[in-house]
Image (cartoon, rainbow, N blue to C red):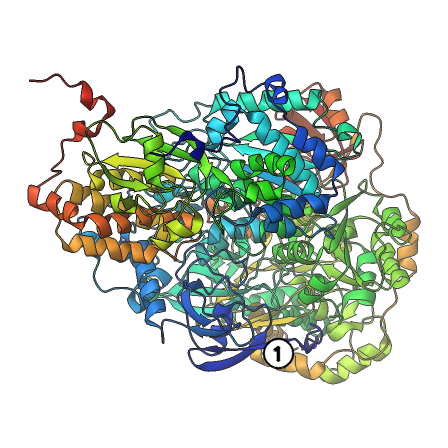
Amino acid sequence: MTVSTSSTTGDRSTIEDLVTLTIDGIEVSVPKNTLVIRAAEQVGIQIPRFCDHPLLAPVGACRQCLVDVPDGGNGRPIPKPQASCTITVAPGMVVNTQATSAVAEKAQAGIMEFLLINHPLDCPVCDKGGECPLQNQAMSNGRGESRFHESGGTKRIYPKPINISAQVLLDRERCVLCARCTRFSEQIAGDPFIEMIERGALQQVGIFDPDRDERGTSERPRGQSGTAAEPFNSYFSGNTIQICPVGALTSAAYRFRSRPFDLVSSPSIAEIDACGSAVRVDHRRGKVMRRLAGDDPEVNEEWITDKDRFGFLYARQDDRLTHPLVRNEETGELEPTSWPAAFAAAAKGLAQAESVGVLTGGRLTAEDAYAYSKFARVTLGTNDIDFRARAHSAEEAEFLASDVVLRNDVSYADLETAGVVVLIGFEPEDEAGTIFLRLRKANQARGTRVFSLAPYTSRGLHKMGGTLIPVVPGREAEAITDVASNGDIALDRGGLILVGERTAEVPGALRAAADLSRSTGARLAWIPRRAGDRGALEAGALPNLLPGGRPAGDPAARVDLAAAWGVESLPETTGRSGNELLAAAAAQEVRGLVIAGVDLDDLPDPALARDALETAEFVVSLELRASDVTRAANVVFPVAPVADKAGMFVNWEGRVRTFGAVFDDPSSLPDLRILAGIAEELDRPLGFRTPAQARAEMTQVGPWDGPRAEIGTETERAASSTTGADSTAGAFVLASWKQSLDDGRMQDGDDNMRATARPAVVLVNATTLAGLGVAAGDPVTLTGPLGSLALPVGVADLADGVVWAPASAPGASVRHRVGPAGCAVTLEGGAK
Amino acid sequence: MSTPDTLTPVLTDNWDQDRSWTLAAYESQGGYAGLTKALKMKQDEVIEAVKASGLRGRGGAGFPTGMKWGFIPQDNPKPKYLVVNADESEPGTCKDIPLMMASPHTLVEGVIISSYAIRANTAFIYIRGEVLHVVRRLQRAVQEAYLAGHLGKDIHGSGYDLDLVIHAGAGAYICGEETALLDSLEGRRGQPRLRPPFPAVAGLYASPTVINNVESIASVPSIIDNGADWFSSMGTEKSKGYGIFSLSGHVTNPGQYEAPLGITLRTLIELAGGMRDGHELKFWTPGGSSTPLLTAEHLDVPLDFEGVGAVGSMLGTRALQLFDETTCVVRAVLRWTEFYKHESCGKCTPCREGTWWLVQTLARLEQGNGSEADLELLIDQCDNILGRAFCALGDGATSPITSSIEHFRDEYLAHLEHGGCPFDQAASTLFATEEVPA
């Protein structure tokens, strides 16, 4: 491995004041302010509970965890049973739980009986049946028989289920009103779109809906009030389903799909973003049925984004490639063939093409990226390899080499302890949801000050209690430099700088960020969007870097690696970046391309990319699903989705996140196995065929211990050139980024999730809106280099001359239909 | 027969005055004299006077008012608030609404003195929104007080500033629970808060807050004006002073009777002209429906905190609901329980689900269905609610049931034997006397 696995979570061995108490006759010492229910867990006593959740503030609503306290620590008994989830420990306290106290046992049985009187007891048809805390605890701590039924009781009934968003369904009959979901939404996600409404036994979770009545059975026509309901469209809504202790919240994706006892659970790592969140993959008969958040206190705690949770159906789409395809030169059609024949065809074509470049995209495991890196250097003999399937620059490549690769000195824990965090070109809620949750937690709990260099105060920034440092797209470099002398921010050694990958769009910005880190002492972390980016960087899938952070331009590094690889030498020629490679292909300077997992529309110049593919003599595509590249490819290899292979992602921290294969499908080959096949045909083998072998070799090769590359003159030249798109008369600069839920291909297949995406809207400032002569919500037409798009307009605190629009909203993709971030656009009132 | 001297009209003294709710009428009887006096005292002297008077909270729990004020941490840099709980919603309780109706300035003066004592510059009166007429009278009284310089900046040249806000609630019983009231006042949904932190430390807007009942605050001007000794000369050893006793139900002259604490129901009924003609007291609540009901054998219990507590009930709000022998206790208890079911806020399981079930069990019994075992079920349900609920409202819901089964078990059984209610329900109505002889 090229990155050490040691974490930098800091030394937690601070001596805490311990409090000693007795629970069920067992003495236990715990830190002061510990809740009794947590202290009991320390000695293995499980007190039943519903509302209690270790990551939510205590509420004491369900009363299931009542215990007897014969001595409150002051020698006196507490007369009533106490909720152990709200009472903190005291020295000398004596607590008797249901295990030793008849009072506690009866109190708990009484609460359980109450909870069940209005519960439908429809466990046989409930998704939660079999993994339900209510079911389990009713068995362990409840009465065997229902006196409610015996006494002729009538249950409360509701129509069921109701949608509280396109994805999340609510069965109000099953709900025990523990308020975990509403508290999560308010306390953790900051999206209080659901709240308890009504009262008594008719209390229920609800969304804002002016047309509802108390039972939700309104005969009133929908929309009568003229005000739209506001559904539970939170990027984190799925977590409420997971922490619901009953079957009240279910997802459209999983509802009625399977029973928990038929599922096999495999731990894995989310492949959606660079957060490295732990997930649990539940599958049955070779199909993923659902994904849940894994419990990893150092990374994602117990939360994941909806994309992490629901975004797995992309691997089951109709366009999934199943067989190797080779283009029949006579018919021009792709034809299924055998793996050996395809390896041979690819090898032959690449050998004939002579000059070949590699584009890998950002979705690879570190092992696969390493295989591409070695394939390029050893098999193809080139440094023409780039994983950056997005806007990028030479400055970025240098920045990654000088300030990012091999570094892992900023962790999630540091986000919580930092005094100040400066975000540059980075919108955490959209681009790295787990970081967003941690920053919000830090701000809520410790008042961590968050500053964002961004075009406007986004919802996410507002929820983090953050402050906007307004910047006009293209002028980031100056703004970053100014941060050093900004007394309000007071950035120092206790601070952090989080730089998003979008910063590469702006010449000079990354260099300024690196300088800011050096001048203030604040530590810097680079946050890419994709799960494979950081691993690809470590694996050297970049023209200027070899595996283990070895500078490709450093002869000593090349010798070191050549020795480790057992080859005579490594290519010396400076490699081409992705942009340069495509331009070279279009100009027939490069004649062959190996392309893996690249969506051409993500590239800065999709037209150039299409041109390059058309022009190239020989294109090998390694892909999961058919794409634009497939249509131009000469040989197409289907690759294994993440669920079919073992591997590791390196997350933004530099933390290695390994995972095993969920499924064992011999016909589903990881990229590295395919590359090994081609390399062997070319007689320049990679030396490994499995992820385990690749990982062993990576460990053996190890990190570079020589001098790092410096951020160089290339950058200075770029910085001095004109920046961004200066707005011409009547034109605006487009600020834009991809939101969490968008038209990305990895979200394909779950339309309900996509329906919870934020509606596309063009944001302008109030002055601009007035100038357009339209009101907020009216349509405006945004026109850029690619064309025009009509969208509703909204108001935000943007600078004059700046307009914001989402880059990739479903059905309204600004990056496809208007232009990329930073381009000049015009705006007109009304839909044209 | 007691003499009218038994009564000690202080709060109710001016109610019979012409347009008693106006500032002019109030001041003509010496109103705002207590304020003038208080503003010349140091704040801590005011607190000491209230402590010395022995005034205990008039909202039901009877916590010493001066001590509550003393809990406010004066070194806390946050603003301090006084909140008056005027969300009088307990079935039977009807003392604060008439007081604010007849003499809102008594309350306003009390608010100013109390706020001055705890160094609050903003005070709120949270009043239930249904009593619109009273809300308007209070609003007008506050307006008059501002115009007269009793409220606002630099009150009477003392350098003390106070703003008083009248806030109308939306009509939820739970908002009479002090922490739910604070949530509601902050614009949230009224549900009780977890304690600690207590309101004295982190109450309204997470700032130190005193929450007092209307009658408690309204008693403050008279204490300041007449002295703590005057106040503590009335009442009993541990329950000082006077209070409004609200007689309702089958009594000849229902209404507000202001008397020293420790008076007996026997005396009060005499003052009210006796029970309804030809009828006898059967059961009564000492302080609203949440206090365990008592019977005729408790007529001589001194109505103070200790006396009523000693017979297994609570003084509560001195809402004396009197029921004569025509009343079916099962029916009365069911009606109260329906109230609690309707008003349960839903936050905690025992109150929310328990009241839902209690109503069903009681309704079956009233209809003569069920069995004697259902009485044990009822008692067990109450046992599972009492002391298990989040706030005192759950406890209150069990009081009428357990106490009625204790005192009138046979009447419950009679429903089962009779196959329904054995009472002539019309006979308990107020118009029953108008019935035409056959």
The answer, for residue A321, to whether it is visible in the render is yes
- What secondary structure is found at the residue carrying circle 1? helix
Give above or below for A637 relative to A732: below
User: Residue beneath label 1, please?
Assistant: A695
In the shown orientation, is residue A590 left or right of residue B332? right
In the shown orientation, is residue A606 left or right of residue B257? right
Task: Determine the residue positioned at 48% across, 39% down.
Answer: B175
Classify the position of the N terminus of chain A by image quarter: bottom right
Crowd band around label 1 with a 10 angstrom C-alpha radius: few (<14), some (14–19), many (20+): many
Quarter of the figure with residue A696 = bottom right
* Amino acid type assigned to the residue bearing label 1 in the image: Arg
The answer, for residue A159, to whether it is visible in the render is no
Task: Determine the residue positioned at 39% across, 57% down.
Answer: B387
Q: Position of residue A276 (x, y in %)?
A: 60, 64
Give above or below for A39 relative to A808: below
Give above or below for A395 relative to A684: above
- Residue A766 or A683: which is nearer the viewer? A766
- Residue A543 or A399: which is nearer the viewer? A399
- Residue A178 or B51: which is nearer the viewer? B51
Which chain is indicated by disc 1? A
- Residue B91 or A261: which is nearer the viewer? B91
Q: Position of residue A131 (x, y in %)?
A: 36, 64
Furthest residue in direction top, as rendered: B18
Classify the position of the C terminus of chain A by image quarter: top right
Q: Position of residue B265 (x, y in %)?
A: 34, 40
